[in-house]
């Protein structure tokens, strides 16, 4: 059999298998089924980015995904708070298992990615370094109708598709901030580097202090169309 025919046969078999999964003829675990809703309780895998993208314009699928999280959330109607910054498929997140410095409004993919990040990245990092959980997350906000600094391009914040994470508080009251604790060799700096790595795995874009001076005091995370970890 020639290579071309072998490749065609493999493609046909793969297509047939995918169709059988889609039709429900073949039963596989939901975490490996690209058409099954995202379950944030399950560890991320190669299909997770695909499932996060699927939430972008599907409110029902968004709700199914967020129901598997521990977040205190409310799906919001589409709105246009400022003429040039319409908001679509957004979610308002308030205090729940973890407190926030203030409630925030973000797109469903950002909120779902945050839920994955908190469960599979942030809390494991806190347990690894400090042996206790994070109980509060401080942030600088999500929605801001503006351009990227010194640019004519719209920021992901203009569509609430981003969140700026500034600091964390542990169960014993210990405070950790990006501005104060990123530099150094101690436990706080090690924790923040683990958190940065976890954010890079959960979100499409993660920008921290080593990106530029504008990010010296926070991690910018978003679900834009590019993959960047800086």
Image (cartoon, rainbow, N blue to C red):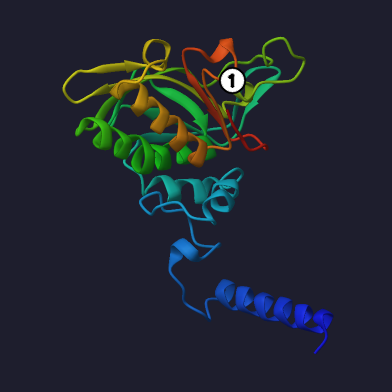
Front-most of residues 103 and 152: 152
Residue at the spot x=35%, y=44% of the render?
69
Q: Position of residue 25 (x, y in %)?
A: 53, 81
Q: The C terminus appears in which quarter of the rendering?
A: top right
Camera-nearest residue between 195 and 204:
195
Point out the image quarter for the N terminus.
Answer: bottom right
Would residue 108 be seen by someone viewing this image from the given angle?
A: no
Front residue of 59 and 44: 44
In the image, residue 209 sits, relative to residue 112, either above or below, namely above
Residue pictured at 48% horizontal, 57% vertical: 37
Quick check: 144 left or right of 104? right
Please provide percent x and percent y for residue 60. 51, 49
- Name the one closer to the observer, 137 or 209: 209
**Is 145 rendered above or below residue 15?**
above
x, y percent for residue 117: 41, 38
Q: Is residue 146 visible?
A: yes
Task: Please state if 143 lies on the left or on the right of 29 as rendered.
Answer: right
Task: Report the residue that reaches farthest toward the bottom.
Answer: 1
Q: Secondary structure at mark 1?
A: loop
Image spot of residue 112 (x, y percent): 46, 41
Figure quadrant of residue 183: top left
Query: Which residue was labeled with disc 1?
Result: 211
| Residue drawn at the location 57% of the way across and 26% of the way down | 160
Q: What is the quadrant of residue 150 in the picture?
A: top right
> Going 77% across and 78% down the picture, which residue do you hit?
7
In the displayed structure image, the side of residue 31 where residue 7 appears, left or right: right
């Amino acid at each position: 059999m020639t290579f071309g025919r072998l490749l065609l046969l493999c493609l046909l078999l793969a297509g047939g298998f995918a169709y059988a999964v889609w039709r429900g003829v073949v039963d596989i675990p939901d975490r490996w089924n690209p058409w099954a809703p995202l379950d944030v309780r399950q560890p991320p895998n190669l299909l997770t980015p695909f499932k996060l993208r699927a939430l972008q314009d599907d409110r029902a699928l968004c709700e199914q995904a967020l129901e598997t999280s521990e977040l205190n959330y409310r799906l919001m109607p589409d709105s246009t708070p400022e003429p040039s910054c319409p908001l679509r498929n957004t979610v308002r997140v308030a205090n729940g298992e973890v407190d926030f410095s203030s409630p925030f409004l973000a797109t469903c993919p950002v909120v779902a990615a945050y839920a994955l990040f908190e469960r599979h990245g942030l809390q494991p990092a806190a347990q690894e370094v400090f042996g206790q959980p994070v109980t509060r997350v401080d942030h600088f906000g999500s929605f801001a109708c503006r351009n990227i600094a010194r640019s004519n391009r719209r920021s992901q914040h203009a569509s609430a598709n981003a969140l700026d994470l500034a600091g964390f508080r542990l169960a014993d009251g210990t405070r950790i901030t990006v501005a104060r604790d990123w530099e150094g060799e101690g436990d706080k700096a090690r924790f923040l580097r683990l958190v940065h790595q976890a954010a890079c795995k959960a979100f499409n874009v993660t920008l921290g202090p080593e990106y530029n001076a504008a990010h010296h005091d926070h991690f910018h995370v978003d679900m834009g169309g590019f993959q960047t970890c800086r």
